[in-house]
Amino acid sequence: MVETSETLNCYVEIEGDRHPEFFRGTACGTFLVYHGTVYGPSEIPAGLILNQMAFTPIQCWGAEPSAPEGKSYNRRCVMAGTSGILLEQVDVWTPGGTSIDTSINLTRTASGLPPVGPIIVYRAGDCYVADNDYGTGSVNLTNRTASRISEQTGRVRQWQDTTASPRATMAEMYYLSLWWQIRLGVPFASQFTTDRHDNAAGLSWEVDS
């Protein structure tokens, strides 16, 4: 089962597991940093360090996306506080499958803060793969992926950048370290931790404002 909350938490269940793929179900989501403020889901379990301002859900305008035959999708639209930045996210997946394609589109509205400095968008989560909070990780610069690997089953929860943007980066590390990087508003550094740890992983994109 795949769900996206109104403020862009992600939730994934795998058949046969006792627990969802992310810590306490929703320790995963989309984040945006602008003018030193972190915007994101209203709540991230064990993520108080983020100190984020919750996205404001709004009604999506325009035509609904057309998912390929046999696919399901979620479409969410949010505002990043009073910044004037509107974020539209569409998640597409095959029911019963394990792959989710996420597209994110940013639009600057007429009101809001004047454009100053870059916008950084993150898609990241505190992993709980195969019913275990701990595992190892990897980053593959050729495939543009950050992965969390289960010690028991070898199952991989992977984030892959498909934009080919030179300003896209990735990371896998101890979950508090990853949340702290988002809190600081710095792009991920395409790094990973090789030993067994309570891990998180994700992608970041730097976008001109």
Image (cartoon, rainbow, N blue to C red):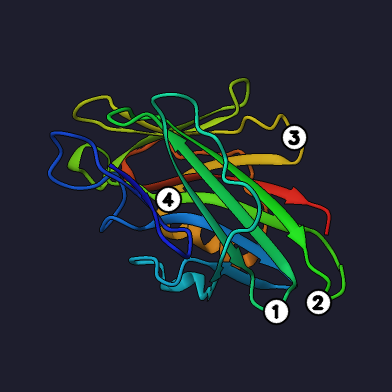
Q: Is 73 in front, or is 188?
A: 73
Mark 3 neighbour density, 10 Å: few (under 14) some (14–19) many (20 or more): few
Give percent across and percent down for residue 159. Answer: 49, 36
The residue singled out by tag 3 in the image is 165
The amino acid on which the numbered mark 2 sits, given as a three-letter code, is Ser
Q: Is 59 in front, or is 208?
A: 59
Q: Which circle's residue, 4 or 2, is located before the other in the chain?
A: 2
Q: CA distance from mark 2 to mark 1?
A: 8 Å
Determine the secondary structure under disc 3: loop
Label number found at residue 70: none
Q: CA distance from mark 3 to mark 1?
A: 27 Å
Query: In the rendered image, is residue 72 in sight?
Result: yes
Give percent across and percent down for residue 41. Answer: 47, 66
The residue singled out by tag 2 in the image is 111
Q: CA distance from mark 3 to mark 4?
A: 21 Å
Q: Which circle's residue, 2 or 1, is located before the other in the chain?
A: 1
Camera-near label (3 vs 1) is: 1
